[in-house]
Image (cartoon, coloured by chain):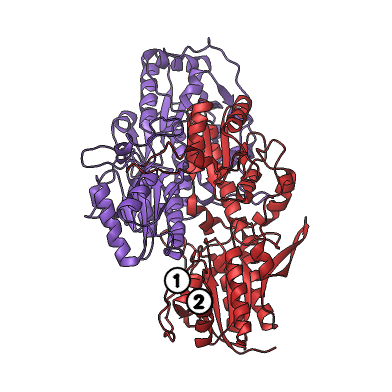
Chain colours: A purple, B red
Amino acid sequence: MSLTGNAIVAQSGGPTAVINASACGAIQAALDSGDVTAVYGATNGILGVLQEDLFDIGAEKAETIEAMKWTPSAAIGSCRYKIKTEADLARIVDVFKAHDIRYFFYAGGNDSMDTADKVAKLAGSQDFEMRVIGIPKTIDNDLACTDHTPGYASVSKFLATQAMEAGRDTEALYTHDTATVMETMGRNAGWIAAATGVAHREAEDAPHLVYVPEVPVTFEKIAADCKEVLGRIGRIFVVAAEGLTDPDGEYLTSRTGAFAQDAFGHKQLGGIAELLSGVIEEKVGVKCRYIKHATAQRNAAHFASLVDRDEAYACGARAVELALAGESGWMVTMERKSSSPYEIELSRAQLSDVANGESKLPRAYVNEAGNHITDAMRDYVTPLMKGEVEVPIGDDGLPSFMRFERKPLDRKCAPWEPPK
Amino acid sequence: MSLTGNAIVAQSGGPTAVINASACGAIQAALDSGDVTAVYGATNGILGVLQEDLFDIGAEKAETIEAMKWTPSAAIGSCRYKIKTEADLARIVDVFKAHDIRYFFYAGGNDSMDTADKVAKLAGSQDFEMRVIGIPKTIDNDLACTDHTPGYASVSKFLATQAMEAGRDTEALYTHDTATVMETMGRNAGWIAAATGVAHREAEDAPHLVYVPEVPVTFEKIAADCKEVLGRIGRIFVVAAEGLTDPDGEYLTSRTGAFAQDAFGHKQLGGIAELLSGVIEEKVGVKCRYIKHATAQRNAAHFASLVDRDEAYACGARAVELALAGESGWMVTMERKSSSPYEIELSRAQLSDVANGESKLPRAYVNEAGNHITDAMRDYVTPLMKGEVEVPIGDDGLPSFMRFERKPLDRKCAPWEPPK
């Protein structure tokens, strides 16, 4: 079972508030193990492996590694590169061989699990013994085989709080700014938008309306919903996932492509928030503001969920445990044993099962009218958002985050030629 | 000196994370005083007075009032109503007389101080003894006669932190999402945008470029600055105040009005962030995301500055102290005695001086190139952003905020007729 060699920890796709905590869990566990000789980071995920752009994480200060527990985004570096060719896969295995990489820990979503799976299989077919374990990561919470995904709860806690806070603005100034639309990430899955619904504890509380991609909707329906809310409480706060679609399956944002042009006369697809804000002003006849946190939402470490952070760390550490026990080709998963009291158990799923699956918001988590969440959604997400990560604050009143020194490894392979 | 009667506490203009703390300071001090018989709230500021829409704050639970210290926005209710006529002013004094309002505490910006000033003078001319004191409030920090304004430091702390956090996203994903523009409030003053510059502790740190309305700029200049930053560190994070102007004094956002149309074919003025994002994609040739916190920025109580909150409370309490001492026609101000160690002293300024003044970001707080801040700005704003307000968190992991029960006062005047 014992396998001596080096490890690579890499991060992929959109950053989160806690993906560094996952990497930290893996790094600290790997550094502690006798089997792992050295722990390397791959700058910008699989792109860093392809470019042989590696650095020695073990050479970093222990306090730098420790500070990953509260530093947002992907400190090792991330990418959106998709493995396109067999040549890419072969190149990855060549780099692994050159640096005696026997352990590969990859934090990411479906595509990353697919990459990890293919790498594991190719290495195996070449009799190069190595162990590949995936660490779940995505704010979108759309990974198969796991109850939820690290990163999701923190973006949810932050955005639900901001909906609550900005909702009070609409409440105080409804005589002037009557409506507000807040956009959340989630092109195909409504998990994040739905989580903001928890802020609506009472009828008065924002958000009053929540729309998700899983339930198609029209401008007319949204306007009618807004009028109902306006008549009932005198103001409107809407949360909309970016990927809302109409009953024909078209993105609502694409419905206006023909009209919008930017400063240079180019066709421009605006975001859902600004689009709905225009729709509400037009069809409901009230002033409407819009909020778009964009990438700021998924990196809000200053108010990250402690449950999320601790689970992220545990998933990273468990990945190393599995590998040291001789396992390969798995992603760490979380199984929910109970919601009240909240209890999860770490488990695992085949990388290929994760790669080919997708987890959508169940219809039962959205009310019949398709414009808010149900108690089932509330019960699901509430335990995940509990606790706050403590972030050290500098003399200037702002958080202190880490950054690696990045001592590069000498290259041993020929320069990589990207596929044409 | 002693004057027995009722008090009104009212809030005006754009909400902040700490305007409720100011109101709380005034309410608690007034409830403690023997001279003030009852403390009323005017729903939606001066509009609430005009409409005789008052409620008894003294009848609220003590813990509700206490919770104003961490509840964002304007819990009493705010408005953007501008007093337009002598009839409005006369109506206000009539309502005050009907309810024996001898104390009027108004938290707001220039316009509110102007209103308060006129009300005080009219009451005096009618031999109705009353004491009117203004409480400074505006996230824009553009009030004259005071070193800074409650509300400013909290929006600054939050946005600087979000620039830092989202900056790490651009840093991790620069191979894909190379540039990001974050928009801050500030139509005429760059105080908020400038404060985010503090997050740039080292060359790598976001924001790399900061633009303010006080220093005119062109699309060409911004593109050139971006290219320089891109060449130096491989990515770009820009903060732009919403009211940027070109050397002709035109808002940059108005420069594209002729081109943009919304879903209904209407001319649409987009925000500066989306505009610059298009400019950067066009002229620099990299993908550019944009972030627009809108009203969520000024209500971020979950990460408000403790210094700001405590000063806000102190300003409210001082307003009552001044009134009880027989003063009227003043706004409470803050005088900075020292930046290191930070020390302020509460003082006061004539309402009319505040109403007619405006505080702009000094040119010396912006670097020569007009694209970032200087150490002078850093020294000015850093002490204000220190400490974090502790917000009680509910069982669902989200903040707990207060809301008034609003026991309405019986109306004693004829219905108000708004000016035509």
- Which residue corresponds to mark 1? B419
Distance from the alpha carbon under mark 2 to that under mark 1: 8 Å
- Which residue corresponds to mark 2? B87
Q: Is residue A68 above or below residue B82?
A: above
User: What chain does badge 1 belong to?
Assistant: B
The single residue placed furthest to the top in the displayed view is: A414
Q: Quadrant of residue A131?
A: top left
Looking at the rendered image, the quarter that the N terminus of chain A falls into is: top left
Q: Is residue B355 above or below residue A109?
A: below
Q: Is residue A35 above or below residue B212?
A: above
Give the x, y percent position of residue A169: 46, 60
Q: Earlier in the sequence, mark 2 or mark 1?
A: 2
Residue B156 appears left or right of B266: right
**Circle number at residue B212:** none
Do the residues indicated by labels 2 and 1 lie within the same chain of the protein? yes
| Residue B233 or residue B412, whichever sits in front | B412
The residue drawn where x is 51% and y is 32% is B279
Looking at the rendered image, the quarter that the C terminus of chain A falls into is: top left
Q: Quadrant of residue B284?
A: top right
Is residue B231 shown to the viewer in this render?
A: yes
Is residue A24 shown to the viewer in this render?
A: no
| Residue A33 or residue A320, whichever sits in front | A320
Give the x, y percent position of residue A64: 62, 38
Mark 1 crowd level (few <14, some 14–19, many ≥20, 10 Å Cα): few
Q: Is residue A192 above or below residue B135?
A: above
Q: Secondary structure at mark 1?
A: loop
Mark 2 crowd level (few <14, some 14–19, many ≥20, 10 Å Cα): few
Residue type at mark 1: give it. Answer: Pro
* Circles 2 and 1: CB atoms closer than 8 Å: yes
Residue type at mark 2: give it. Answer: Ala
| Residue A97 or residue B58, whichever sits in front | B58
The residue drawn where x is 50% and y is 76% is B87
